[in-house]
Image: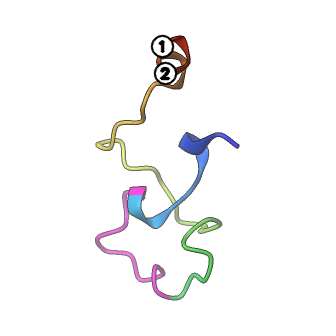
Amino acid sequence: MNGSKRQACVVCAWRENCAKKFCVTDGGARCPDFSRDISIKVPDEEGDEAQ
């Protein structure tokens, strides 16, 4: 599974104002409001494999 594609409350753009983070039992893995925060950089997986 690709780690950069996983949904989680900690990387969601709405995490500060989210009303669902305490009622979603799976940690936000299937949250309908999930949107990745673009200010959090995703490590380049291709660059990691080359090293």
Q: Which mark is residue 8?
A: none
Quick one: SS at disc 1? loop
Q: Is residue 9 above or below residue 20?
A: above
Kindly identify the residue that appears in the image at 51 percent across and 61 percent down: 8
Q: Position of residue 20 (x, y in %)?
A: 48, 81
Kindly identify the residue that appears in the image at 32 percent across and 44 percent down: 40
Kindly identify the residue that appears in the image at 57 percent across and 81 percent down: 24
> In the rendered image, which quarter contains the N terminus?
top right
Which quadrant of the figure has residue 32? bottom right
Q: Nearer the viewer, residue 50 or 39?
A: 50
Residue 26 lies in the magenta stretch:
no
Q: Nearer the viewer, residue 49 or 5?
A: 49
| Amino acid at circle 1 | Gln
Q: Which residue is mark 2?
A: 48
Q: Which residue is mark 1?
A: 51
Q: Position of residue 6 (x, y in %)?
A: 59, 51
